[in-house]
Every structure is written in structure tokens, then in C-alpha cells.
Amino acid sequence: MLKIENLHCKVETADGEEKPILKGLSLEVPAGEVHAIMGPNGSGKSTLSYVLTGREGYECTAGSIEFQGEEISEQAPEERAAKGLYLSFQYPVEIPGVPTITFLKEALNAQRKARGETEVSAPEFMKLIREKAKQLGVSMDMLKRAVNVGFSGGEKKRMEILQALVLEPKFLILDETDSGLDIDALKTVSDGVNALRAPDRGMLVITHYQRLLDHITPDRVHVMANGRIVKSGGPELANELEAEGYDKYLGEAA
Ligand SMILES: Nc1ncnc2c1ncn2[C@@H]1O[C@H](COP(=O)(O)OP(=O)(O)OP(=O)(O)O)[C@@H](O)[C@H]1O
């Protein structure tokens, strides 16, 4: 479903220099599978998620990103989103003045429109949002508040998962979804993610913490170091990393 081959990408720094970050990264996530990426600070995990969604400021100089059999590395972010690629941010943005419920409806309709589908009606949307919000324990009062404004870290993350439940993307990239979550919220978010598991959907979970992977059991775990995947294994690899750290993989990455 997602196939990345020998990807080399650089970022333009604030002082106008070009800094290579991804250095020959290869990774394949088949439909129906959940893969986790772990790795030390600064190894390029967030950069990978930005590059996948086509964020401005990142340039790939070699390699390919195939999504559902199509090369997407030259496509605009909104084109990738319309094709079903969804990124949950490490630091979600605030949108003052826009109620969350309005934002979710507009986001859903924008994607439907881009796919040539009819817009969802107000009653249909209310039915959908009630069902999904209930599933995640989000109150309707919360949905009337401006997007992420004054939300706690855990509430922001919950909203990101709610957005995914509403948009039903084909592929989800979750960047450090456990940051700022207390144990109950972690479980709720993991339940939401598990509810999104489907035979025709893939997921990439970027995380520092093994505890998130206790709730979302990944099919594969990859270690990223110095802009590349240096080790891949089954879910047991996450436990090994938790116990032993990344040291033994850093030499291989240099
Ligand atoms: N715009 C930028 N300008 C300069 N350096 C950058 C820029 N973006 C990323 N980097 C550098 O690229 C490296 C990879 O960053 P990235 O955020 O992808 O790592 P990460 O693995 O997600 O780290 P963490 O685990 O700390 O979140 C870091 O050294 C970072 O400082």
C-alpha cells in the first residue's frame, strides 16, 4: 500500500542552507497492517511524516514514495489528503474562531468534493459525529469550542483521532500520539486507532514509547537512525528497545 524506496530528502534551514535528513530510507507497509517507527531524537521520524504528506520546505532528491501503486512524491498535500493519506501531528494547530464541529464537517466535505462525491448533509453529519464522538468519549460541548484552542494535550490528541474516525483515511500516520496522554486517554486513543484497523487501511505509528505499543500491537516495528531504517522486526523488537536502548543500532547508522 505504501512503498518507500531509497528516499533521500533535505530540508531548507532558517539560514537558507540545505540539510540532508532522510538518507536512503526504505520501508513498505502493506494494506491491513500497522507498523511502528521508533528511534532516537533527531533521527528523522517527524521529517518522514512531513515528507509523506508533502509539507512545504522539504525536498526529496532521490528515491520514490508509492501510495496505492502511484508515485506521490510530486503531488500537493491536498491531493495526497484527498487520496486518503492522513497525518496526525505531534503538535496540532489551533484555529481560533472556528468551532471544531464546523471544521470537521468542512474537512469531510472538502475531501468528498475532491473525490467527486456529494457533500454530506447536516443531519447525516450530526449522526456521524455523535456516533464517533461517543466512541472516543468526546462531549458535544467540546466540539462547539474553537479547534484546539485551550485544549489540553490529551484533548488535542483525542480530536486528531476523532478527525481520523470522521475522515476514514486509507492510510494514517500518527506522530507521537502518546505525548501528553494520561493512561486513560492513552487507552481511549488506542481504542480509536484499533477501531480504524481495516483490511484496506494501513497505519504508521511514530513513537518513542513502548507503552503506546502495548495498546496498539504493531505488525512490524522499525528502528530509524540517521535518516534510515536500520532494523525491522516483530512487536517484540519494541520491548527489546525499551530494555536495551538504541545504542547497538547507532553504529550501523553512521
Ligand atoms: N527546518 C529545519 N532546520 C534545521 N534542521 C532541521 C529542520 N527540520 C529538521 N531538522 C533537523 O533534522 C533532524 C531530524 O529531525 P526530526 O524532527 O525529523 O527528528 P525526530 O526523529 O522526529 O526527532 P524527535 O524524536 O526528537 O521528535 C534533527 O536534527 C533536526 O534538528
Image: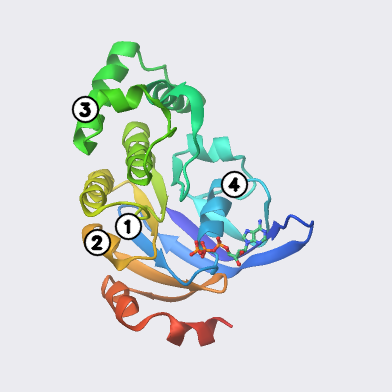
Q: Secondary structure at mark 4?
A: loop
Look at label 4 and name its amino acid.
Answer: Gly
Would you say the residues marked 1 and 3 are in contact, meaning their CB atoms lie under 8 Å apart? no
Q: Secondary structure at mark 3?
A: helix
Q: Residue at x 30, y 52 (%)?
A: 32
Report how far apart the C-alphas of labels 4 and 3 lie in the structure.
31 Å
Q: Secondary structure at mark 1?
A: strand
Q: Residue at x 58, y 40 (%)?
A: 77
What quarter of the picture does the C terminus occupy? bottom right
Q: Where does residue 101 sit, x and y in percent of width and height? A: 37, 23
Residue labelled with disc 1: 34
Would you say the residues marked 1 and 4 are in contact, meaning their CB atoms lie under 8 Å apart? no
Residue extending farthest to the right is 16
Report how far apart the C-alphas of labels 2 and 1 lie in the structure.
8 Å
Q: Nearer the viewer, residue 155 or 63?
A: 155
Look at label 3 and name its amino acid.
Answer: Glu
Residue labelled with disc 2: 217
Position of 89 compared to 6: left or right? left
Look at label 1 and name its amino acid.
Answer: Val
Rate crowding at label 4 as few (under 14), some (14 to 19) or many (20 or more) other CA atoms within 10 Å.
many
Would you say the residues marked 4 and 3 are in contact, meaning their CB atoms lie under 8 Å apart? no
Q: Which mark is residue 54?
A: 4
Q: Where does residue 222 sit, x and y in percent of width and height? A: 40, 70
Report how far apart the C-alphas of labels 2 and 3 lie in the structure.
25 Å
User: If you read the primary sequence from the N terminus, does the residue marked by circle 4 or circle 3 appear first?
Assistant: 4
Tell me how the rendering is colored: rainbow
Q: Where does residue 43 sit, x and y in percent of width and height? A: 54, 69
**Vertical comparison of 27 with 70: above or below:** below
Q: Secondary structure at mark 2?
A: loop
Residue labelled with disc 3: 131
